Image: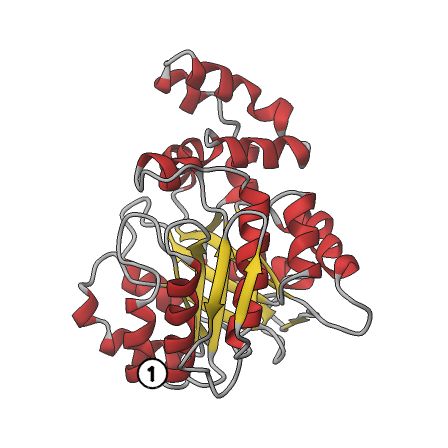
């Protein structure tokens, strides 16, 4: 989306762009979020996006937001394609969409071998095909079809949703490399991307759009990791822990090799594989941290976020990284969009 520069040089959000926050907030219990959700509306945020790793599930925080802040769009990035059966996944998506008609976006992705295999005891087998099959099933189920079909990775015999949403929610695909990105454009309603720079968006977004059927648009949602702090060295030092945790997961390592960042990250991967965590962290270059984590003054952060939007992202979901002792509540206000 195009961005407009103010007289001070800071990016203003385009009216067509969406500006979201990742929930739940780490400093609040779920039952304490009502005031935060209301404040997000007042600050100009348009969306809240949940995730599903090892904290809250991906749907409960959004159900609370549906009741407490009906102005916000609700997105989940993502629900894994493995950890719920297809019918239950469709029921869960339909229930949320029925609670908040026209305000829900469902993200589906393969997740990772850590979450699927190590934490849920499910084989992480054929992730591309499983995600594709779940997306196809979800699109049919949410449309109200009765489904009896043998997909490549599971069989469905006579399922039909009883609760069909008044407005069918878009189904987005979490995508890293070309295969998933093309699938997001061809099979889904868009892509959810993360751990990439604004410049990387110029590589990623066109693949999604080029794969879409002629005349159909696709949404690009980017999860951004943001710390509004001028304590650059502390932010970089602490961000290295988060980067190492993700970039040693095979799917993310392959993603950054594909983006061309491999030579700058190889020393980190080698040290990590050798069991030397301290050396691995030290081997992550400053430029890689600066590529993948938005940091600096609030104005610098908003400018950087604006670059993602200018390069092809339609919706940002900001994850506040609590580095360098920042106050997360203050950070949410500092990062709010400029009208």
Q: Nearer the viewer, residue 69 or 59?
A: 59
Tally of marks: 1
Q: Where, by quadrant of the figure, is residue 136 drawn? A: bottom right
Q: Residue 133 in the image: x percent, y percent?
A: 57, 55
Q: What sort of colour scheme is used for the picture?
A: secondary structure
Residue to which mark 1 is pinned: 69
Give the vertical position of 312 relative to 214 (above or below). Answer: above
How busy is the neighbourhood of tag 1: few (under 14 within 10 Å), some, or many (20 plus)?
many
Q: Residue 69 in the image: x percent, y percent?
A: 33, 83
Q: Nearer the viewer, residue 216 or 312?
A: 216
Q: Residue 177 in the image: x percent, y percent?
A: 64, 42
Q: Residue at x 32, y 38 (%)?
A: 121
Q: Is residue 213 visible?
A: yes
Seen as rendered, the residue at the extreme right is 214
Q: Is residue 36 left or right of residue 29?
A: right
Q: Regarding mark 1 in the picture, which secondary structure is present there? A: loop
Q: Residue at x 59, y 48 (%)?
A: 152
Q: Where, by quadrant of the figure, is residue 222 drawn? A: bottom right
Give the vertical position of 117 relative to 310 (above or below). Answer: above
Q: Residue at x 49, y 37 (%)?
A: 125
Q: Residue at x 45, y 79 (%)?
A: 44
Q: Quadrant of the N terminus?
A: bottom right
Q: Nearer the viewer, residue 46 or 84?
A: 84
Seen as rendered, the residue at the extreme top is 274
Q: Residue 206 in the image: x percent, y percent?
A: 75, 55
Q: Is residue 234 visible?
A: no
């Amino acid at each position: 989306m195009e961005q407009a520069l103010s007289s001070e040089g800071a990016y203003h959000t385009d009216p067509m762009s969406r500006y979201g926050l990742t929930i739940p907030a780490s400093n609040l219990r779920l039952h304490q979020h009502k005031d935060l959700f209301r404040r997000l509306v007042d600050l100009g945020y348009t969306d809240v996006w949940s995730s599903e790793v090892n904290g809250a599930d991906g749907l409960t925080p959004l159900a609370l937001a549906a009741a407490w802040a009906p102005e916000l769009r609700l997105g989940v990035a993502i629900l894994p394609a493995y950890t719920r059966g297809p019918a239950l996944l469709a029921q869960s998506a339909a229930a949320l969409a029925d609670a908040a008609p026209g305000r829900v976006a469902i993200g589906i992705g393969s997740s990772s071998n850590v979450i699927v295999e190590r934490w849920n005891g499910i084989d992480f087998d054929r992730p591309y095909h499983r995600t594709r099959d779940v997306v196809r099933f979800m699109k049919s189920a949410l449309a109200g079809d009765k489904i009896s079909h043998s997909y490549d990775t599971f069989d469905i015999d006579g399922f039909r949703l009883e609760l069909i949403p008044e407005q069918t929610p878009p189904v987005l695909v979490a995508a890293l490399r070309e295969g998933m990105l093309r699938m997001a454009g061809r099979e889904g309603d868009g892509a959810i991307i993360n751990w990439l720079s604004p410049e990387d968006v110029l590589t990623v977004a066109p693949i999604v759009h080029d794969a879409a059927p002629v005349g159909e648009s696709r949404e690009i949602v980017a999860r951004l990791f943001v710390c509004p702090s001028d304590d650059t060295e502390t932010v970089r030092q602490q961000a290295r822990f988060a980067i190492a945790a993700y970039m040693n997961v095979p799917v993310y390592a392959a993603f950054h090799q594909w983006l061309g960042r491999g030579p700058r990250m190889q020393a980190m991967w080698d040290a990590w594989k050798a069991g030397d965590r301290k050396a691995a962290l030290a081997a992550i270059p400053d430029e890689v941290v600066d590529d993948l984590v938005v940091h600096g003054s609030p104005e610098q952060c908003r400018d950087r976020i604006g670059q993602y939007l200018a390069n092809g992202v339609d919706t940002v979901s900001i994850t506040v990284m609590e580095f360098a002792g920042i106050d997360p509540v203050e950070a949410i206000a500092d990062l709010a969009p400029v009208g």
